[in-house]
C-alpha cells in the first residue's frame, strides 16, 4: 500500500474561508478518476471550510494584495485561490 495525493483547487468569492466557491478544479493522483475542467455544474463544496470539514487539508492560501482605488471594476484572474489536499491509500 502507498499514499497518493488528491488536489482540490477552490476559488472563493472573497478571502473568507466561509465564502462561496466560484470556480474549482480537481486532480486525482490515485488514478481512480480523471476529472477535467468544466465536467461538473456545481462545485464539490460550497466553501473552503466545508471541504475542510470533509477531511481536505489546506496547503496554500491566496496571497493578499492591496487594492488600488478605481481598480474595483477591472477584471483579472481569480484572486482567492485555495489549494487543498487529501492523501489516499492505494494498492
Image: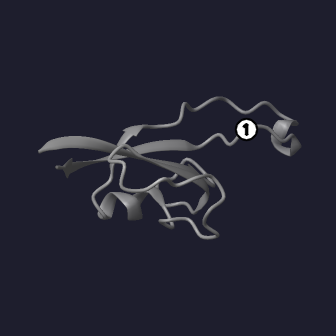
> Outermost residue, bottom direction?
42
Query: What residue lies at 55% left-to-right and 60% top-to-bottom?
Result: 19
Q: Is residue 65 left or right of residue 2?
A: right
Give the quarter of the figure containing the N terminus: top left
- Is 7 rendered above or below residue 69? below
Q: Is residue 52 left or right of residue 13?
A: left
Label 1 sits on a secondary structure element that is loop
Q: Position of residue 70 (x, y in %)?
A: 88, 36
- Is 36 rendered above or below residue 61? below
Query: What residue lies at 16% left-to-right and 41% top-to-bottom?
Result: 2
Q: Position of residue 66 (x, y in %)?
A: 67, 29
The one nearer the camera, 7 or 91, is 91
Query: What residue lies at 49% left-to-right and 65% top-to-bottom?
Result: 44
Q: Which residue is mark 1?
A: 77
- Is 85 rendered above or below residue 43? above
Colour setting: one colour
Q: Position of residue 22 (x, y in %)?
A: 64, 58
Amino acid at each position: 500500500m502507498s499514499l497518493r495525493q488528491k488536489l482540490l483547487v477552490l476559488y472563493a468569492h472573497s478571502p473568507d474561508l466561509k465564502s462561496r466557491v466560484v470556480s474549482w478544479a480537481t486532480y486525482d493522483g490515485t488514478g481512480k478518476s480523471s476529472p477535467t475542467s468544466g465536467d461538473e455544474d456545481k462545485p464539490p463544496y460550497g466553501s473552503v471550510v466545508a471541504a475542510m470539514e470533509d477531511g481536505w487539508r489546506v496547503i496554500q492560501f491566496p496571497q493578499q494584495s492591496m487594492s488600488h482605488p478605481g481598480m474595483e471594476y477591472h477584471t483579472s484572474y481569480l484572486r482567492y485561490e485555495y489549494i487543498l489536499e487529501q492523501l489516499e491509500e492505494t494498492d
